[in-house]
Each structure stands twice: as structure tokens, then as C-alpha cells.
Amino acid sequence: MDTTGLTPQEAARWALRAGLPLASDRHEEVAATANHIRSVIATLRELDFGDTPPAMTYTAGLEDLDASV
């Protein structure tokens, strides 16, 4: 994976390619946000979930509501 990060110019180009043209004053903020998201995803990819079951096995509403935290 590229570790250099997304530049403001690249953010503007990718946004335009996606049909979302950005005002020039937004390029830097969008690039910073995208770089932050990429760093969070990279951290999540390093986690070892081991025997954690997939989310589809969770049934909402069946949790113990009387449990203490």
C-alpha cells in the first residue's frame, strides 16, 4: 500500500472522476480526511480477530439488558 498519502491535487482529481467536483479551498481538507481514514483502515487490517464470529451471527435485541458495564 502506498504510504505517501493522498495529496490535495490527487483528492481533487479523484473527486472530479467520481463526479463530485470540489471547490479549491476544500482540496486540502478532503485529502487530510482521506489520509486519516486510510490510516484507521490500515490499523484495523493489522488486528487479529482470531475466533471472533462474523457480524451476521449477531442477533439484535437478544442481548442481556440487565448486565452491568
Image (tube, helix red, strand yellow):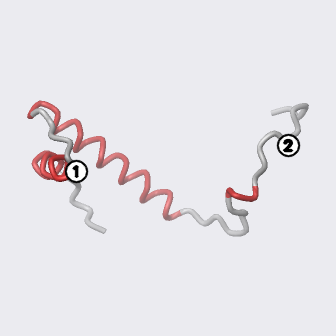
Q: Quadrant of residue 61?
A: top right
SS at mark 1 in the image? loop
- Which residue is drawn at the image coordinates 42% and 59% (left, top)? 42
Q: Quadrant of residue 64?
A: top right
x and y percentages locating residue 56 in the rendered image = 70, 58
Q: Tell us which disc is closer to us: 1 or 2.
A: 1
x and y percentages locating residue 50 in the rendered image = 68, 69
Q: Is residue 20 above or below residue 46?
A: above
Q: Amino acid at mark 1?
A: Ala
x and y percentages locating residue 4 in the rendered image = 21, 59
Q: Give the residue at mark 1.
A: 18
Residue 20 relative to residue 62: left or right: left
Q: Give the residue at mark 2.
A: 62
Identify the mark nearer the N-term, 1 or 2.
1
- Number of numbered discs visible in the structure rendering: 2
Q: Quadrant of residue 23?
A: top left
Q: Is residue 39 above or below residue 69?
A: below
Image quarter where the C terminus lies is top right
- Which residue is drawn at the image coordinates 75% and 58% (left, top)? 57
- Which residue is drawn at the image coordinates 49% and 63% (left, top)? 45
Residue 37 - label: none
Find the distance from the CA under tag 1 to the CA under tag 2. Answer: 41 Å
Image quarter where the N terminus lies is bottom left
Question: Crowding at label 1, few (<14), some or many (≥20) Cα neighbours within 10 Å?
Answer: few
Residue 35 relative to residue 47: left or right: left
Q: Amino acid at mark 2?
A: Leu
C-beta proximity under 8 Å, tags 1 and 2: no
Q: Furthest-front residue in view?
A: 19
